[in-house]
Image (spheres, rainbow, N blue to C red):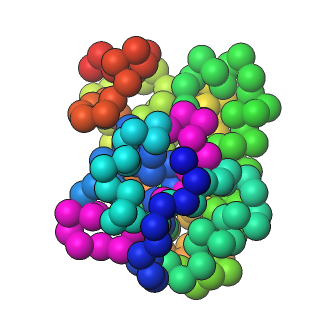
Amino acid sequence: MGRSRRKSGAEYLVTGGAGFIGSNVVRRLVEQGRRVRVLDNLSTGRPGNLRDILDEIEFVEGDIRDEKRVGQAVRGVRYVLHIAALPSVIRSVQDPLTSNQVNVCGTLRMLLAARDAGAERFVFSSSSSVYGETPVLPKRESMIPSPLSPYAVQKLTGEHYCRIFRNLYGLGTFVLRYFNVFGPRQDPASQYAAV
């Protein structure tokens, strides 16, 4: 896919912007007239999710673990919406090391780059998996996390890193714990497709 035609000076960086959730966020920002840059390595995202709006965004193909590429992607943006991840509890159980490298090291790489570039806000996409199997409903942020998989531990670690970066460096960090997300461009073959 390579790079699209560039719009000068992106205001938002959306990591994982070619994925299911990310592409919907990118589209919403474009509808609002925002200047958007996407960073995606296309390992789980699909080029088709952005094909019809490529001339309205800046697309950077790259991995969130790549220090140089991340530094280029975050340069000049005010807001980082960090959605990129290696999803799937099952995948994390089968290959916890690779999953950790993307979900923890990649998130830390993004936080460092956002801090160093002077970004105002960093929004981290976490997961309801951090709650574990507690039967209490509705879930509340005050509940003690009880992760049961490497993926859940990795998302919880990302949350802790966000808190630390807010407290130590003053980076405005926000965490969203997604539950059953569904909508346009969702992969119908995904294990999470049925709510």
Query: Is residue 164 visible in the rendered structure shown here?
Result: no
Q: Which quadrant of the figure contains the C terminus?
A: top left
Which quadrant of the view contains residue 107?
Answer: bottom right
The range drawn in magenta is 29-45
- Magenta-span inclusion, residue 41: yes
Who is closer to the viewer here, 49 or 152?
A: 49
Is 78 drawn above or below residue 154 in the view shown? below
Location of residue 155 in the rendering, given as x and y in whole percent from the top left corner: 57, 42
Location of residue 104 in the rendering, given as x and y in whole percent from the top left corner: 69, 47
Who is closer to the viewer here, 149 or 142?
A: 149
Who is closer to the viewer here, 19 or 137?
A: 19
Location of residue 112 in the rendering, given as x and y in whole percent from the top left corner: 69, 70
In the image, farthest residue toward the left: 31
Residue 69 relative to residue 50: left or right: right
Which quadrant of the view contains residue 88?
Answer: top right
Location of residue 57 in the rendering, given as x and y in whole percent from the top left corner: 39, 65
Is 21 drawn above or below residue 165 in the view shown? above
Number of residue marks? 0
Query: Is residue 134 visible in the rendered structure shown here?
Result: yes
What's the residue at 49%, 38% (across, down)? Answer: 45
What's the residue at 67%, 80% (across, down)? Answer: 116
What's the residue at 60%, 36% (across, down)? Answer: 43
- Magenta-span inclusion, residue 28: no
What's the residue at 49%, 26% (across, down)? Answer: 132
Residue 150 relative to residue 133: left or right: right
